[in-house]
Image: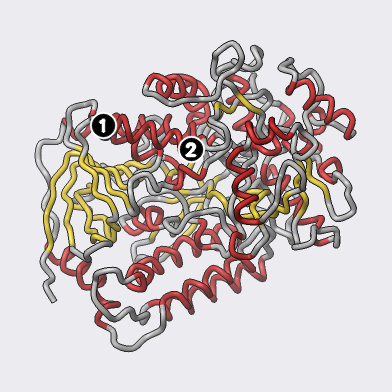
Amino acid sequence: MDEGYTTHQYDVVVIGAGGAGLRAAIEASSHNVSVAIISKSMLGKAHTVMAEGGAAAALSNKDHRDSWQTHFRDTMKGGKYLGDWRMAQIHAQQAPDRIRELEQWGAVFDRTPKGITNQRNFGGHTFPRLAHIGDATGLEIIRTLQQKGIHTGMEVFMEYTVRTLFKTDGHISGFFCYNRQDGSLHLFKAKKIVLATGGITRCWEVCSGSWEYTGEGHALAYWVGAHMGDMEFVQFHPTGMIWPPSVKGILVTEGVRGEGGMLRNSEGKRFMFDYVPEMYREEFADTEQEALEWVEEVIAGKLATKRRPPELLTRDVVAKAINSEREAGRASEHGGAYLDISWRDEDEVRKKLPGMYHQFMELAAVDITKQAMEVGPTAHYVMGGVKVDSYTQETTVPGLYAAGEAATGLHGANRLGGNSLSDLIVFGKIAGEAAAIAAKSTSDYLDIDQKEIDYAIKTTLAPLNRSEGENPATVVEDLRHMMQNKVGIIRTGKLLKEALKDLDELENRAKFTSSPGGRIYNPGWHQSLEIQAMIDVSRMCALAALHREESRGGHTREDFPIPDHQKWGKINSRIKQDESGNMVIDYTKYPPIPEELKVHLDKDDLHEEE
């Protein structure tokens, strides 16, 4: 078997071709450096296209009272004050410019009758803030970024999987990867690297993530020595499809609730009124009539003066409420809840939610203009990721940057809907710019140890050379089932300890998976190579969840149901390797919030001692 490899050199290489990766590559290219972008799948297939509801930015088009300060407050409050206030400020201030920039590049956002960008309501946002294109916002953003990007001179490598990042004298120097189509091997030398690899949700059995979301970016950073943060916080989106089984987990956009969708249990009760946390009580309606009046005001194009419907609470609250209704025996026919938008005008539903209309009609034979949808929680997003510098997005490994879902900081313990798309374009730009400026001041490419390259080749080809061994699909299936049951939406110390033991056993099984045959179109080979990353990011989640003995945001401990503000309220978990290569956990704090920003926050929620 030919084990040769091809060598490439670029000033900046962006790993990942979603919203953050494309925006980083566009920005880096504008600084006249050589740029390559590596995509695990085909260009245009990024998980960003699955973000449907909109991109959050305080444009103040739908409600003149909105501002970056209110967006900052909502983001911090939604994240239970565990987010990096510096990133929250940058994001809130720069998101409007990034949306307007997309429009200048050709993005066709929905318009108000006055011709300005329309904005819709979403959970956790005080005002209508999400710029949208029907319910296909992510798809339009990717289309716009690709159209802009292909004219900048960047080179695109599609269907390549990165296996190992390399450091030389403590600085990032390149990576090894292989072509998924023909199995060819490639070495990339790079002055700077931007990780924009998305999330990890394929580690759970029921998830909204596409097949690429196996956590390899998180694992690559960890393996090369980067610090990881907040890995206990995984967001279970409240509304994924649950029937038929073949489509279980596919996302049902929050835009349905933003347009007036109501959640009801098997008894027909609109149950979210029973689950409004005290910290949100003043902002949300107490009665169904009050909630309906708010929606009617919004539909009529008025400034909503009444309190919002409780379906627009933050995702962690809504997901746990649906789970509680199921536990109480009030689930829908197939174990979830009913989401009903059929009370609105049929033509308006088709106009506002065309993707959802076709999705349910084609996949579930349900006409959402006449029938309620069945929905349930689905693993959707990880708030945790690679720890980065707030202003440059550089990780703790010099020369390695991260942006989007691969990075942590902005979202704290829970992400608000719509903040993901604006996160991508705000911090993708910042990472690309910082990487390019740093690359221009770096004269030479660093040498990479040949022994490390040889080892990467050996481990990459190993599953092909085993004639006997377990099918990798079986190991992955067992891993996802275990994570669903033991590190899912509701956790206990007992189950988390079991999960860590199970992961050790799965790791031993993974070492001997076999995928004999050639390198061309061998999906078993690809899956064999993904398992270690899935195991390590799963271990990070379980370890961080075990140690945080409280419930907060996307992390719920049945044995510690109350948030412990004094002990856990201001510290963030950090996972790294010790000198022996073992996974260890400790805790860090962000700098104190300055007084000029603190005035925009709810003082009672900060739980500061007098």
Could you say which quadrant of the image residue 524 lies in? bottom left
Q: Amino acid at mark 1?
A: Ala
Q: Earlier in the sequence, mark 1 or mark 2?
A: 1
Q: Going 40% across and 21% down the picture, which residue do you hit?
A: 101
Q: Could you classify mark 1 by the number of other residues whose Cα lies within 10 Å: few (under 14), some (14-19), or many (20 or more)?
A: many
The quadrant of the rendering that contains the C terminus is top right
Of badges 1 and 2, nearer the viewer stands 2
Residue 596 at least partly seen: no
Q: Residue furthest bottom?
A: 468
Q: Going 63% across and 32% down the picture, which residue do you hit?
A: 352
Q: Residue 522 or 310: which is nearer the viewer?
A: 522
Residue named by callout 2: 138
Q: Amino acid at mark 2?
A: Gly
The local secondary structure at tag 2 comes to helix
Residue 586 at least partly seen: yes
Q: Position of residue 111 (x, y in %)?
A: 56, 20
Q: Position of residue 473 (x, y in %)?
A: 45, 75
Q: Position of residue 136 (x, y in %)?
A: 52, 37
